[in-house]
Image (cartoon, grey):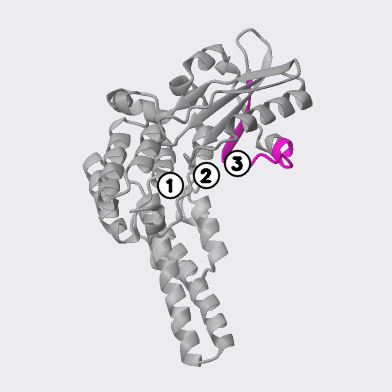
Amino acid sequence: MTDQDIDRPTNHDSPWKEALEHYFQEFTQLLFPAIHHEVDWSRGYNPMDKELQQITADANTGRRHADKLIQVYARDGSETWVLIHVEVQGEPEEGFAQRMYTYQYRLRDRYGVDVVSLAVLADTRESFRPSAFHYERWGCKLSFTFPMAKLIDWEARWADLEASDNVFALVVMAQIKAKRIKDGATRKDIKIALIRLLYERGYGREQIVQLFRIIDWMIQLPRELEPGFVQAVFALQEEKKMPYVNTIERVEREKALQQGLQQGLEQGLEQGLEQGLEQGLEQGVGQGRQLEARRILHRQLSKRFGELPDWVSEQLEAADVDQLEAWSEEILVAESLDTLFRH
């Protein structure tokens, strides 16, 4: 199986950005322990994505991946910004080290503070290990080096990752398997094993949801294997007595959209006109979104408040997509059905 065999596009950019946003401290602790030791974590850290975009917007440095700029505070009392460049696509690139240098000098020139550049290489080519950029001309010489972590080096320490209490170990494990395993059935087994490990670590629900989404995003499966994965997740939740809904919601959302699209196609074909086809597609997708949103909210309400009275079902049937999605967000803080629906 290749990435083209997976119905949903394989995109490791977003899950890595999300992982670094939420678990930057754990990231440095696992992959760059020397850097982790120098940071005063008691003062927190501040993501600076917009500032990084301003720096790199006109940089002619080839394809970019999951770049993150984080402001941290050093233990010695000084303020330091840390630039993390993560090559989540895992493809060796000749100009990688030069790009790291470009980011480095632009940031230092603009902000006038120390910049520490870190690189994580997720590719599987053993020989690709850039950690420095050099040039020399007529007596003028420049040498720039940066810490680098190669994820496949952790394959020899897989048992350490499995036993680690660092949440970022799961992210590393998922990324390695996403790159190494191409067979769909094997990917499904690996994904289930990682989800089981996630549940067994005793994390709270919020952290489980966050890590589950990252793993689910990284290790994607062919569409025909999704039902088996979903069933395995249900079984695991029953075993661990830890309900989880996001994966099932994702699958149902995709199914609902597909059903809506199919309904739109059929309606358009029956009309026999191009305009009818376009209108049918739009209407079908809209119906699919509304069906999916209603179904998800009904399940959330049942889990939160138990058996639902008839008037709630009537409210759901009458609501449009925007209202259903708004209720889905408000359910997290609503104390009762009456307060949620203002009935």
Give the distance between the C-alpha atoms of the residues marked 3 and 2, in whole angstroms. 13 Å
Disc 3 versus disc 1: nearer the observer: 3
What are the residue bounds of the magenta stretch?
54-72
Counting the numbered discs, the total is 3
Q: Which of 251 and 106 is in front in this view?
A: 106
Q: Residues within 10 Å of mark 1 (few under 14, many from 20)?
A: many
Q: Distance between the residues labelled 1 and 2?
A: 8 Å
Q: Is mark 3 on a helix, strand or loop?
A: loop
**Discs 1, 2 touching: Cβ within 8 Å:** yes
Residue 109, given in percent of the width and then of the height, sits at 77, 24
User: Residue 83's image quarter?
Assistant: top right
Q: Which of 101 and 186 is in front in this view?
A: 101
Q: Where is residue 153 in the image (x, y as percent from the top left)?
A: 37, 26
Type of the residue with mark 1: Trp
Q: Mark 1 points at which residue?
A: 217
Name the residue: 69% across, 30% down: 102
The residue lying furthest to the front in this view is 138
Q: Position of residue 190 (x, y in %)?
A: 28, 42
Q: Of 101 and 106, which appears nearest the observer?
A: 101
Q: Which of marks 3 and 2 is nearer the N terminus?
A: 2
Q: Crowding near pointer 3: few (<14 within 10 Å), some, many (20+)? A: some
Q: How far apart are marks 3 and 1 (CA)?
A: 19 Å
Q: Using residue 63 as the reference point, say whether residue 236 is left or right of it.
A: left
Q: Residue 44 carries which label?
A: none
Residue ID for mark 3: 64
Up-down: is 290 above or below 8?
below
Q: Are marks 3 and 1 in contact (CB under 8 Å)?
A: no
Write the residue at 49% across / 20% down. 32
What amino acid is labelled 2 in the image?
Answer: Ser
The residue under label 2 is: 14
Tell me residue 233's x, y (percent): 28, 48
The residue drawn where x is 61% and y is 18% is 43
